[in-house]
Amino acid sequence: MNISHLQYFLDAAKNQSISRSAQIHRVSHSAVSQAIRSLENELGIELMVHSKRMFELTQAGELCRTELSRVLGDFNDFKELVRQASKEPTGELILLSPQSLISDTLHETLFLFRQRYPKVRIRLTTGAAHNVRQGISDQSAQIGFLLDDGLISGFESTLIRKGHFVLAARKKELSLEKASVLITSPQKIEVQHLRRNFEARFKKNLQAEMEIVSWGLIKQMILKKNVIGYLPDYCIQEELQMKKLFAIEGPGSAFKYELKAIWNKNKSLHRNAKLFLSLLKKEQV
C-alpha cells in the first residue's frame, strides 16, 4: 500500500476536494483520482461516491478518513523521531546524585558518555537522597540516582543494580560488639535495620561513634582508623578485592538495597538522559 496514495486520499477527504489535494501535493487531478481508485481496488471497497458531481465519502470512506488521520499522524511522528535520532546529540545532560554514587558507580559512564557525545555539555550536581528527589520534582535535573528508600513512588524509575549494606573495617579482627561504628543518619531504614539486629543479638543498644552524612567520607575514615563503617557494597568493592578493607560479621541478615534512576513522572525522559541511562545499564551488566 502506497503511503502517498493514503495521504492523497486523506487530504481530499479533509478538504472535500480532489483538486485541493492535488494542489497540496503538487500533482495532477488525475493522479489523485487514480490513487484513490488504486486504494479502493486494493481494499475491495468504495471510499467515495463516484456517480455524484460533488465530493462525498461512503460510510467506509468516513471510517477510513478517521483511522488514516490517526495512523498517518503516528507515522509522521515516527519519521520525525527517526530523523532526530540520526542527528548527533547536543544540548545538556543534567544529572543529580549522591557523591558516593558518582565516584564509585557513575564516573566511568560519565567519561564514556563524554567521549561518545562530545557536543553534549554535562552538568552534574551532588546531593543526598532528599536533594535528588527535590531536584527531579522541580525539574532542575533531567535524571537522578539514589538508593530506593521507599519514597520514590511519585517518580518514574528504573533499576540499575541490587546489592546489600556491609560492615567493613581495615582490620578483620575488629568486633562489632566492641569497636566503634560509623553510620549515616539513625533515621535511615538501613541503619534502623542494623540497630534492630544488633539489639536482638547483643541485648543492648548500638552505640554509634559518629554520624556522617556521606558514605564516601565513612569509607575514607575506615581506611585510616580502626573503626567499623556501615555502607553499601558498591562503595567498597575495589577495597574489599584488594584487601584494603575486610567485611565484618553482622548481627543478622544484611540489608538489601536497590539502586535506581528516577525522573519526573509528568515529563518524558530527555533524550540525552536516555542515552546516558542506556550506557550505564550496559556498564552494569
Image (cartoon, helix red, strand yellow):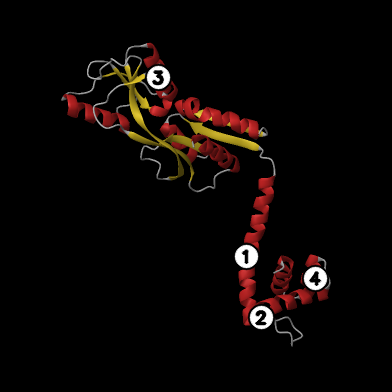
The reply, left or right, for residue 254 in relation to residue 98 is left
Q: Amino acid at mark 3?
A: Lys
- Local packing at callout 1 (Cα closer than 10 Å; few below 14, some 14-19, many 20+) is few
Residue 137, image x and y in percent?
47, 40
Q: Which mark is residue 85?
A: none
State which quadrant residue 22 falls in.
bottom right
The residue where tag 1 is placed is 71
Q: Nearer the viewer, mark 4 or mark 2?
A: 2
Mark 3 and 1 residues: CB-CB less than 8 Å, in contact?
no
Mark found first going from the N terminus, 4 or 1: 4
Mark found first going from the N terminus, 4 or 3: 4
The residue where tag 3 is placed is 219
Residue 219, image x and y in percent?
40, 19
Q: Secondary structure at mark 1?
A: helix
Nearer to the camera, 244 or 194: 244
The residue where tag 2 is placed is 44
Q: Amino acid at mark 2?
A: Gly
